[in-house]
Structure formats: structure tokens, C-alpha cells
Image (tube, rainbow, N blue to C red):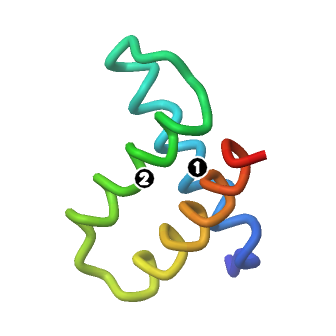
Amino acid sequence: MYKSEEEKVNIVIGEAILGLIDNDVDIIAETVTENLKQMLALETDDARRRVIKKAIQLTSQAFLH
């Protein structure tokens, strides 16, 4: 099943949020962005790295506003 880029970004953001919940960290845009950056540092798949980068852009914009 093919997922749209938006769906993939939402899934990655969800994964980042679940990781924060697992570690009992406050769920705010800044912590989600930081967790996504950590995910990016560990990711080796180029397609997934692009999705994570888009997710970082979206969550970074959220805490700048």
C-alpha cells in the first residue's frame, strides 16, 4: 500500500511522540523536533530521512509561532 508524503510525515511524527511518551517526556513541539533530529541521526534509509526532515520542518515551525 502506497502512502502519501503527508501520511508518512504524520507517521514519523507519531513515532517521535510515542518515543517521548515511553520516556515520560513532555509532549511539546520542541521536544518532538529534538526527538525527530535524533531519529534522523540514526536513520540510514534516504527516503525515510527525507520524510523525517519534512517532519522536522513542520514541528520546528510549530514552536516558532
Q: Is residue 5 above or below residue 58?
A: below
| Secondary structure type for disc 2 | helix
Residue at 64%, 67% in the rendered image = 8
The residue beneath circle 2 is 36
| Secondary structure type for disc 1 | helix
Residue 41 place in picture, x, y as percent: 23, 65
Residue at 31%, 82% in the rendered image = 45
* Label 1 CA crowd tier, 10 Å (few <14, some 14–19, many 20+): many
Q: Earlier in the sequence, mark 2 or mark 1?
A: 1
Between circles 2 and 1, the one closer to the viewer is: 2
Which numbered circle lies on residue 2?
none
Q: CA distance from mark 2 to mark 1?
A: 7 Å
Q: Amino acid at mark 2?
A: Leu
Q: Nearer the viewer, residue 50 or 56?
A: 56
Residue 13 place in picture, x, y as percent: 58, 49
The answer to which quarter of the image holds residue 47 is bottom left
Q: Is residue 44 left or right of residue 61?
A: left
Farthest residue in the front direction? 64
Q: What count of labels does the image hold?
A: 2
* Label 2 CA crowd tier, 10 Å (few <14, some 14–19, many 20+): many
Q: Is residue 46 above or below residue 52?
A: below
Q: Is residue 59 left or right of residue 52?
A: right
Residue at 68%, 77% in the rendered image = 1
The residue beneath circle 1 is 13
Q: Are marks 2 and 1 in contact (CB under 8 Å)?
A: yes
Q: Amino acid at mark 1?
A: Ile
Residue at 59%, 62% in the rendered image = 55
